[in-house]
Image (cartoon, helix red, strand yellow):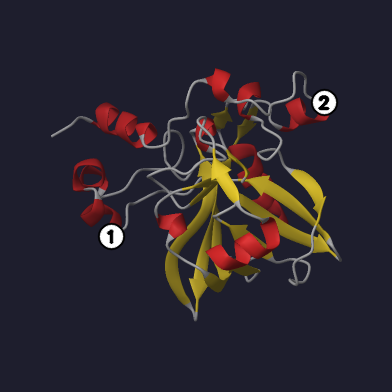
Amino acid sequence: MHDRRTLLRGLAATALALPLAGCTDVPATLPVAVTRRYGPLEDGGFRIAAVPHAYLTSRNQRVTVAYTGPEPAGTIVVDPHARVLYLVTGPERALRYGVAVGWEGRNFAGEGVIGRKAAWPPWRPTPNMIRQNPELYAPYAAGLPPGPPNPLGARALYLYRAGRDTYYRIHGTQEAGAVGKATVAGCIRLFNQDAIDLHDRVPVGARVRVRGADESARLEGRFAEGSDGYLRPA
């Protein structure tokens, strides 16, 4: 049996980024507003580290963009194929967040609602996660308390459908280097700073749409994964 520290390293290893030198679309300098937005902060009695500059690629930064989808304001649109999440804010406008997409995040499409949300939630692997990777997840069957290094990070939004939990989560992450990439662990993960921002903007009951591959290609175009793990237009 692995000890707790070893297993937590295992959880982190599923989302490790490639070396920082591989991040080729990070500006040489970032605006002060961006560095402040992703700076260190104290929240709920826990300290959140600053996001390293090298992970703040142009697609990973939270930014207001033109939006051409049909969803009304207040809708969360998750695109696991383009590795972005939109919060529609008005006609043809949305906030775009970069996300990490884990195995669980790639196996759902369609609509639901935010059935509940939580600040610094506890975490417990689902039965399916334990079946898929018992060596990594079985020791955590009883769960982890809130706070670092809990894999749900600072905030979590829980997707429900027809009144039932789908086990699809939009949540923070302790592994900033995973954002913008496909990973083994997790559902849809944001920088903790962005998870807090989204949590504060979205009420329980908000509509969520998770795009399928064809819809993503039609609206976002097609992407290829570079050697650094980030997507670029194909």
Whole-percent x and y of residue 84? 63, 50
CA distance for labels 1 and 2: 42 Å
Whole-percent x and y of residue 215? 61, 67
Q: Which residue is mark 2?
A: 31
Q: Amino acid at mark 2?
A: Pro
Q: Earlier in the sequence, mark 1 or mark 2?
A: 2
**Residue 203 seen from this side:** no
> Where on the picture, by quarter, is residue 40?
top right
Whole-percent x and y of residue 58? 71, 35
Q: How many C-alpha atoms fall within 10 Å of the one at disc 2: few (<14), some, or many (≥20)?
A: few
Q: Residue at x 38, y 45 (%)?
A: 185
Q: Residue at x 21, y 56 (%)?
A: 131
Q: Amino acid at mark 1?
A: Asn
Give the number of the disc on residue 128.
1
> Where on the picture, by quarter, is residue 106?
bottom left
**Which of 22 and 48 lies nearest the eye of the viewer?**
22
